[in-house]
Image (cartoon, grey):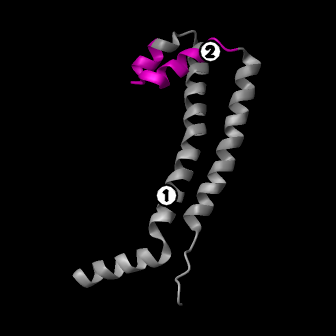
Amino acid sequence: MVETGFLVHELDARVGGGILAGALAFRIFLFMVPVAYVIFTVLGLVSRGLGHDPAQLAREAGITGVLASTVVKVADQGTWTLVTLVLGAVVTTFITAGSLLKALLVRPRLRGS
């Protein structure tokens, strides 16, 4: 078991595991930003379309802080502004999803092999 731990540590050092982990974490973050924006904007639009108070809907959904203010501010935007922002966020989501998939599918080459 100890030998396996040393082998894993050696392999991690050879392939640059820390750099790969950092790159993956960065791409996950870049993917989550537009996804969260789309989700909370759509939530605000739905509440507006149903005639409910967005702030109340956010509280019922357990959303607090900055995310709740995003849901509430959707009600203050014009329709074309929201459509443009959501379409931009959806396109950004697809672009960052591609980048994330590339990072997940990378196969590190071992030095010396």
Whole-percent x, y for residue 4 in the image: 29, 82
Report whether residue 1 is seen. Answer: no
Is 45 left or right of 59, judged from the image as shown? Answer: right
Q: Earlier in the sequence, mark 2 or mark 1?
A: 1
Residue located 42% across and 24% down the image: 63
Residue 92 vs residue 59, the one in the foreground: 92
Residue 103 vs residue 9, the one in the foreground: 9
Q: In the image as oriented, which residue stretches furthest toward the bottom?
A: 113
Residue located 49% across and 75% down the image: 15
- Picture quadrant of residue 107: bottom right
Instruction: Measure the C-alpha gap from mark 2 to mark 1.
Output: 41 Å
Vertical position of residue 36 compared to residue 4: above or below: above
Residue located 53% across and 89% down the image: 112
- Residues packed near mark 2 inside 10 Å, few (<14), some (14 to 19) or many (20 plus): few
Q: Secondary structure at mark 1?
A: helix
Is 98 left or right of 63, judged from the image as shown? Answer: right
Q: Which residues are magenta?
A: 56-77
Report whether residue 69 is seen. Answer: yes
Vertical position of residue 108 compared to residue 30: above or below: below
Residue type at mark 1 is Gly
Q: Which SS does the magenta portion mostly show?
A: helix
Residue type at mark 2 is Gly
Residue at label 2? 49
Cβ–Cβ under 8 Å for marks 2 and 1: no
Residue located 68% across and 30% down the image: 86
Q: Confirm whether the magenta stretch covers residue 22.
A: no
Whole-percent x, y for residue 11 in the image: 42, 79
Is 75 left or right of 7, judged from the image as shown? Answer: right
Vertical position of residue 32 compared to residue 75: above or below: below
Residue at label 1? 22
